[in-house]
């Protein structure tokens, strides 16, 4: 049991990562919240929930886009702004 905990690698994302890649890891890890970590500083810069993902996917498809990056999903307001461009 302790060995399993020590080998556990949490699911994390970086701001520039493709959303599709992060969604696959969320599903594989059976998680609903993913911390977003800055690659350079190692600091927590936000988080993504399964609800954020759904809102983004619906918005992206509504506007004919097929992909987006994690940093575009962290805030619904930011996603709406990006889609308006």
Image (spheres, grey):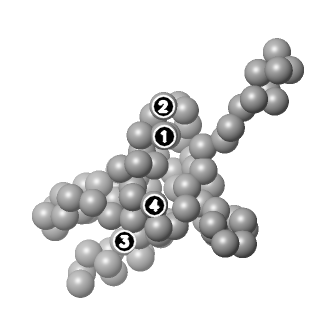
Residue with the most extreme right position: 2
**Mark 2: few/some/many CA within 10 Å (<14, 14-19, 20+):** few
From the viewer's perspective, is residue 3 above or below residue 9?
Answer: above
Q: Position of residue 75 (x, y in %)?
A: 47, 69
For label 1, the residue is 25
For label 2, the residue is 28
Earlier residue among tags 3 and 2: 2
Cβ atoms under marks 1 and 2 closer than 8 Å: yes
Quarter occupied by the C terminus: bottom left
Quarter occupied by the N terminus: top right
In front of the other: 12 or 60: 12
Q: CA distance from mark 3 to mark 1?
A: 21 Å
For label 3, the residue is 79
For label 4, the residue is 17
From the viewer's perspective, is residue 57 above or below residue 26?
Answer: below
Disc 2 secondary structure class: helix
Earlier residue among tags 1 and 4: 4
**Mark 3: few/some/many CA within 10 Å (<14, 14-19, 20+):** some
Residue with the most extreme top position: 1
How many circles with numbers are drawn on the protein? 4
Cβ atoms under marks 2 and 4 closer than 8 Å: no
Q: Position of residue 50 (x, y in %)?
A: 46, 46
Q: CA distance from mark 4 to mark 3?
A: 15 Å
From the viewer's perspective, is residue 24 above or below residue 17?
Answer: above
Disc 4 secondary structure class: loop
Residue ID at (34%, 59%)? 56
Q: CA distance from mark 1 to mark 4?
A: 12 Å
Residue ID at (29%, 54%)? 57
Task: Say which mark, if any, is on residue 54.
Answer: none
């Amino acid at each position: 049991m302790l060995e399993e905990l020590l080998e556990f690698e949490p699911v994390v994302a970086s701001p520039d990562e493709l959303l599709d890649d992060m969604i696959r890891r969320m599903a594989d890890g059976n998680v609903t919240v993913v911390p977003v970590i800055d690659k350079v500083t190692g600091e927590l810069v936000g988080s993504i929930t399964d609800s954020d993902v759904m809102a983004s996917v619906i918005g992206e498809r509504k506007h004919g886009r097929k992909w987006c990056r994690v940093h575009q999903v962290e805030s619904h307001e930011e996603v709406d702004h990006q889609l308006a461009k």
